Amino acid sequence: MALTATPYDVPMRAMVGADGQVLGHGGSMAPVSSTATTTTVPSANTSATALAANPARKGATFSNLSDQAVDLRFAAGPATTANSSHRVAAGGYYELPFGYTGIITCISGTAGTGNLRVTEFT
């Protein structure tokens, strides 16, 4: 039986690094991690450090186990609800994109019950 091409047949191409791993967008490899460190930040209406700057960071996740939204700031200085980079809803989850390795601070609009669970991959 002979195979025939259809309009839906599209050649698949991938860039492969010297180690055989598929390269991601922009020619960079997806980060690989074998270590995860989990910390907990209590829900509060004052700014707190969620993650210190870490040049070895490959990624991070944020699980909001609070009954209040948590605002994350990806820059130096205290977080406020007005200057945040991303808001994680109560019960929500967020994955840090783009290999950001700087400080991350957080704040809740009001003190809530629960905490922000942060896992950093290095």
Image: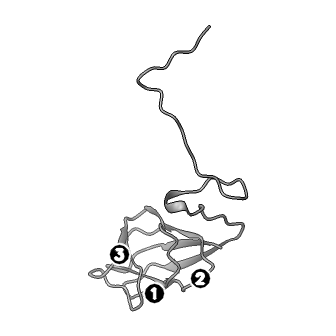
Q: For marks 1 and 3, give the CA distance.
A: 15 Å
Measured as percent of width and height from the top left, residue 71 is found at 37, 75
Measured as percent of width and height from the top left, residue 1 is found at 62, 7
Q: For marks 2 and 1, give the CA distance.
A: 20 Å
The residue that appears at 29% across and 82% down in the rendered structure is 83
The residue that appears at 38% across and 90% down in the rendered structure is 78
Nearest to N terminus: mark 3 or mark 2: 2
Mark 2, residues whose alpha carbon is within 10 Å: few (<14), some, or many (≥20)? few
What colour-coding does the image apply?
one colour
Q: Quadrant of residue 86?
A: bottom left
Q: For marks 3 and 2, give the CA distance.
A: 20 Å
Nearest to N terminus: mark 1 or mark 3: 1
Give the mark toward the camera: 2 or 1.
Answer: 2
Residues at marks 3 and 2 touching, judged by CB atoms closer than 8 Å:
no
Nearest to N terminus: mark 2 or mark 1: 1
Local secondary structure at mark 2: loop
Q: Amino acid at mark 1?
A: Ala
Measured as percent of width and height from the top left, residue 24 is found at 55, 57
From the viewer's perspective, tell me whether residue 46 is left or right of residue 55: left
Residues at marks 1 and 3 touching, judged by CB atoms closer than 8 Å:
no
The residue that appears at 51% across and 34% down in the rendered structure is 11
Q: Which mark is residue 48?
A: 1
* Residue position marked by numbered label 3 in the rendering: 85
* Residue position marked by numbered label 2 in the rendering: 55
Q: Amino acid at mark 3?
A: Ser
Measured as percent of width and height from the top left, residue 80 is found at 32, 84
Give the mark toward the camera: 3 or 2.
Answer: 2
With respect to residue 26, does 15 lie above or below? above
Is residue 78 something that shows in the picture? yes
